Image: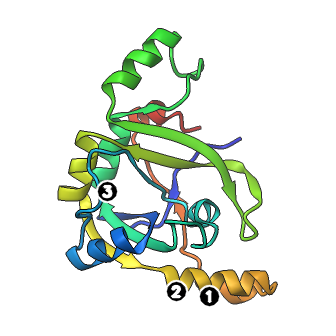
Amino acid sequence: MTRHVRAAFTPETITVYQAYADRIAIPALSAGTFVAPFKVTRMTWIKPSFLWMMYRSGWATKTDQDRVLAIDITREGFEWALSHSCLSHYDRNHFTSEEDWRAQLRSSPVRIQWDPDRDLNLNPLPGRAIQIGLSGEAVTRYVDDWIVDIKDVTQTVREIHRAVTAGHHKAVEGMIPREREYPLPDHVRDRIGSE
């Protein structure tokens, strides 16, 4: 089972996704970053995989996840997050002991979780998609320093969903973001358990 970070990215930015209710999405779109009632004191999860975000939000139909935002953040910020992360579950292949894992978990402001990636019908795929949980210093950096642009992609999400539901998969090929493997430094790959 592969664990690669796949994403849409440019030389300067990487796109991640989040889904929120209007009360958080609308002020964020207006401000160009997350502002109240978004709480920097809570963990916030960013997802580079578009189809995993569709799975999580039910194609923007789940309560409080009906606005899907595409957020371009700096690659420098993204890599800082991964470099300061800890796997959310103990993995004996990446830690010498459970105590070492717990110590890293306590000191890291970022959590990494690997979940089955999804196809257009939201069925699980053999590979894993990364979810990145930001807390503490990482949320502050995300909100204040990393965000370059926020777009509302909800309408596109709904159009894709309608076409997929009707079985018109070919029609949406150009609408799905082109994601490719993100090049990670070796020390970051080791830190997040990428294989």
Q: Tell me whether the residue at label 2 lies in contact with that at label 3, contact meaning CB atoms closer than 8 angstroms.
A: no
Residue 155's disc is 2
Residue 125, image x, y percentages: 74, 54
Which residue corresponds to the image point at 44% horizontal and 46% vertical from the top-left?
132
Gap between marks 1 and 2, in whole Å? Answer: 6 Å
Tell me which label, 1 or 3, sits earlier in the chain: 3
Gap between marks 2 and 3, in whole Å? Answer: 26 Å
Residue 65, image x, y percentages: 51, 67
Q: Is residue 95 above or below residue 139?
A: above
Residue 110, image x, y percentages: 37, 38
Helix, strand or loop for disc 1: helix
Helix, strand or loop for disc 2: helix
| Quadrant (top left, top right, bottom left, bottom right) of the C terminus | top right
Q: Which residue is mark 1?
A: 159
Which residue corresponds to the image point at 53% horizontal and 48% vertical from the top-left?
130
Q: Which residue is mark 3?
A: 75
- Closest to the observer: 192 or 18? 18
Residue 31, image x, y percentages: 21, 74
Q: Which colouring convention does the figure follow? A: rainbow
Does residue 55 appear in the picture of this structure? yes
Q: Is residue 112 above or below residue 39?
A: above
Gap between marks 1 and 3, in whole Å? Answer: 29 Å
Which mark is in front, 1 or 3? 1
